[in-house]
């Protein structure tokens, strides 16, 4: 019998998705976003599979260090920059490119000892109100960065979109307008688009794009599937049946006796639970793929197990493989059942689930 639960990663799909993104954003360079353990897909194997990316982007210094330790030589962008002088020196030592989103980070650069020449991405807050210089503070920040004792190797500009994944486009258009107004007359490379931006308006695909979710083959849109975008799912979350029982009408299944059989039912117990990263809130009716058919989860998700009604799939036996999401059962669909987004499900796959490359 195969491993009870595992996340199988398909490197060919990663490369396919990168190519799809390149076709959408032909003139842009691609910064592959691999933060949060590559959205649960494994930081290093994902970066190795995406060797063609023009750069990698991570959220934290430690993620960048792990990439360098694995021999990754491409540019690595720290999307949140650094927060202490020690981190700044570490970033210099490992040749990381830095986002600068705050005056404190400019100060760190001004006070840095040594003469490292960074690629610096100055972040402009055009409406997300999370990180970045508000437009009225941008000119002063740029001036200080230009005057750094240790001149930047290159200055680039970025902003992040709040609503690229949903119509109407007022917010995105307003952010784009503010970005253009703030950067008018400047001749630096710019980056605006995340995954939703890449598949949104062509004006968002400027010098650099920053896709994360799309690389992993999931759609950021509620109304367009990954397949419609030309993306292939990269992760298959697979498990198998560890027990079967036949229950009679009126019996209940699982904790809280939360589900009651309306008629005689064949139940398969699957080795996958919230200890593996499935949301405990997955409701009855959420599908799994078993024996090539959709079958509904019934009752509560436990730590190590779920129960599935397989009355309509007679060939199921102990050991039958089960797909929790992957090709044929998009993670976006499971996310809708869970009342969340594919990002969260992918990032939540827990430590005890082995990652395997196909
Ligand atoms: C995470 C992140 C991205 C990638 O977003 P996706 O929606 O996954 O494509 C891009 N840019 C920044 C600044 C991010 O933090």
Image (cartoon, helix red, strand yellow):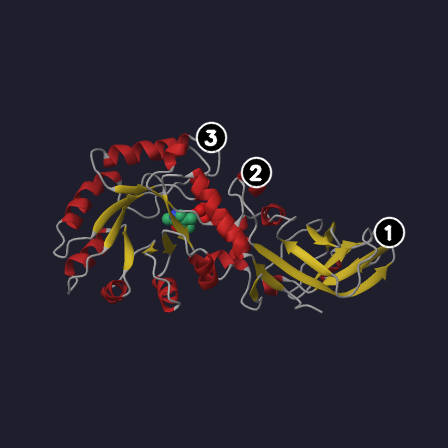
Q: Mark 1 falls on what kind of element?
A: loop
Q: Quadrant of the N terminus?
A: bottom right
Gap between marks 1 and 3 measured at Cα = 46 Å
Foreground label between 1 and 2: 2
Horizontally, is 31 left or right of 324 in the view?
Answer: left
In the picture provided, is 297 more to the left or to the right than 69? right
The count of marks equals 3
Expressed as whole percent of the image width and height from the top left, the position of residue 211 reads 43, 47
Q: Earlier in the sequence, mark 2 or mark 3?
A: 3
Residue that badge 2 annotates? 228
Q: Which mark is residue 168?
A: 3
* Mark 1 to mark 2 CA distance (whole Å): 39 Å
Q: Is residue 242 shown above or below 333?
A: below
**Residue 100 bears which disc, if any?**
none
Q: Name the secondary structure under disc 2.
A: helix
Q: Residue at the location (81% across, 53% down)?
A: 313
10 Å crowding of disc 3: few (<14), some (14-19), many (20+):
few
The residue identified by callout 1 is: 263
């Amino acid at each position: 019998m195969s491993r009870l639960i595992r996340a199988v990663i398909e490197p060919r799909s990663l490369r396919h998705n990168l190519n799809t993104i390149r076709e959408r954003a032909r003139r842009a360079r691609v910064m592959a976003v691999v933060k949060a353990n590559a959205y649960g897909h494994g930081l290093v194997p994902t970066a190795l599979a995406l060797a063609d990316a023009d750069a990698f982007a991570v959220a934290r210094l430690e993620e960048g260090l792990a990439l360098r330790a694995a021999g990754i030589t491409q540019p690595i962008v720290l999307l949140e920059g650094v927060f202490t002088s020690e981190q700044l020196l570490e970033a210099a030592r490992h040749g990381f490119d830095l986002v600068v989103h705050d005056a404190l980070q400019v100060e760190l650069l001004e006070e840095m000892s040594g003469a490292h020449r960074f690629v610096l991405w100055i972040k402009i807050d055009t409406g997300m109100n999370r990180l970045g210089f508000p437009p009225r503070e941008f000119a002063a920040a740029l001036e200080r960065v230009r005057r750094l004792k240790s001149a930047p190797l290159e200055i680039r500009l970025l902003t992040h979109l709040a609503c690229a994944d949903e119509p109407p486009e007022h917010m995105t258009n307003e952010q784009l307008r503010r970005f253009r107004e703030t950067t008018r007359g400047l001749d630096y490379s710019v980056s605006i688009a995340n995954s939703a931006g890449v598949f949104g308006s062509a004006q968002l695909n400027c010098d650099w794009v920053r896709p994360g979710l799309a690389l992993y083959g999931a759609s950021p849109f509620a109304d367009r599937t990954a397949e419609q975008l030309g993306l292939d799912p990269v992760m298959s979350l697979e498990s198998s049946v560890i027990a079967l029982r036949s229950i009679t009408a009126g019996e209940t299944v699982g904790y809280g006796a939360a589900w009651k059989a309306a008629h005689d039912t064949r139940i398969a117990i699957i080795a996958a639970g919230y200890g593996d990263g499935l949301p405990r809130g997955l409701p009855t009716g959420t599908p799994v793929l078993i024996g090539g058919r959709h079958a509904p989860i019934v009752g509560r998700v436990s730590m190590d197990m779920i129960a599935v009604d397989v009355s309509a799939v007679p060939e199921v036996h102990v050991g039958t493989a089960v797909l929790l999401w992957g090709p044929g059962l998009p993670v976006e669909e499971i996310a809708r059942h869970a009342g969340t987004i594919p990002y969260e499900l992918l990032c939540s796959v827990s430590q005890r689930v082995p990652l395997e490359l196909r």
